[in-house]
Each structure stands twice: as C-alpha cells, then as structure tokens.
Image: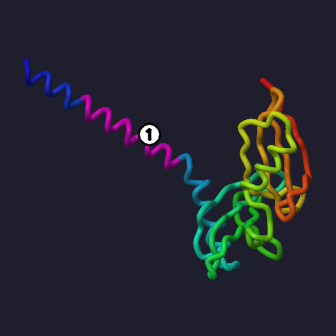
Amino acid sequence: MLKNKKKWIFLGIVAFLLIVFGLYRYYIYVTQDIRAQETAAILKAKQETSLVKVTEAQKSVWDTICWAIEGLDKDNRPIMVWVTMDENGKVKSGEGAVHEELLSNGMSENQIKEKATKEIPDVKKLKAVPGMYNGEYAWQLFYWSKDHYYYQFYRFSDGQSIGGPFTLPNR
C-alpha cells in the first residue's frame, strides 16, 4: 500500500513538472517575436548612437511603431533612444530611423507624471510610456479619470500637451 502511494505521489510530481515546463516553453514561443524586435532595436540603437548600457526598453504603438530605449551613454549620462519600426516589425533604415536624446534635455517620467497629476482631475492608474505622436518624441500617458480610461500625449522636450485626451469606451 505504501509503495503504491509513493508511486502516485512521484507520478503526480512528474506530471506537475511537465505541465510547468510546457507552459514555460509556450510562453517562450508566444513572446519570441517581440523579443526579436526588442533585440534588433537595441542593436540598432547601440550601432547608431552613443548608447552603451540599456536600463529599459519599451515598445510604443500609436501612429508610429517604435522602441524607446532608456540607458546610459559612453560618458555615463542617462539617454533615451527611439528606434522606429516598420509594419512587419523590422527596424527602419535611413535618416530619422534612430533618434538619441539626453534625458536632461527633456522631461523625465516622474516630471511628466507630476504634471499630469496637477492638470488632470481625479487621475488614477497613471502610466507613462515614451513613444512618438505625429512624428514628435513624446510621453504617452494612459490613465483613469471620471469613469473612463484615456490616452494623452506630452512632448518629450518640454512637456507640452500635443494630443488627446483620447477616451477609451467603457465595456
């Protein structure tokens, strides 16, 4: 009886581990395209700018698909690099495909969140993502206010509102 119980416990553990491993492999499979895009954008940013160390990379999709890569340059100064992508997820080439800016030349994430908190009544669940809007480098804000979710864009360089608010419909 004890041998039979140990056998079922062992089989249960093996089955559990196989399920966890299968879920892990599925996750890797599902996210491989986005990881490949991120890697390509980071490589392009390192090739064409002074980016040396990456601290964060975020994809932004509005009217332009781009990766905003935050990191440090060769002088250890914080920078932001925007790498534009085409509709197929490939890095664009040519002039304007990659843009580098010192973070000190623009608004930081905390500064733009403070500004939004002061300007927007009852703002909650505020998230700021660097991106592009109508060809300008911007902060894309996503927030909850007055029973709706909104998107709003602020220029990276000076924090001026350049688009929105765009209301998302309630379900």
Residue 161 in the image: x percent, y percent?
90, 52
- Residue at the spot x=70%, y=58% of the render? 89
Type of amino acid under label 1? Leu
- Residue at the spot x=58%, y=72% of the render? 53
Question: In this orientation, which residue lies closer to the viewer: 57 or 85?
Answer: 57
- Residue at the spot x=82%, y=72% of the render? 96
Residue 86 in the image: x percent, y percent?
76, 61
Tell me if residue 159 is in the magenta stretch.
no
Residue 29 in the image: x percent, y percent?
51, 48
Question: What residue is disc 1 on?
Answer: 23
Q: Residue furthest bottom?
A: 75
Q: Is residue 60 above or below residue 124?
A: below
Give the crowd class for mark 1: few <14, some 14-19, many >=20 residues within 10 Å. Answer: few
Quadrant (top left/top right/bottom left/bottom right) for the C terminus: top right
Q: Residue furthest top?
A: 1
Scheme by which the image is coloured? rainbow
Question: In this orientation, which residue lies closer to the viewer: 139 or 120?
Answer: 120
Quadrant (top left/top right/bottom left/bottom right) for the N terminus: top left
Q: Is residue 129 above or below residue 169?
A: below
Our reading of the magenta stretch's main secondary structure is helix
Residue 41 in the image: x percent, y percent?
66, 66
Judged from the image, the secondary structure of the residue bearing numbered disc 1 is: helix
Q: How many marks?
A: 1
Tell me if residue 16 is in the magenta stretch.
yes
Q: Is residue 63 above or below residue 137?
A: above
Give the residues in magenta. 12-29
**Location of residue 94 by image quarter:** bottom right
- Residue at the spot x=22%, y=30% of the render? 11
Question: In this orientation, which residue lies closer to the viewer: 36 or 156?
Answer: 156
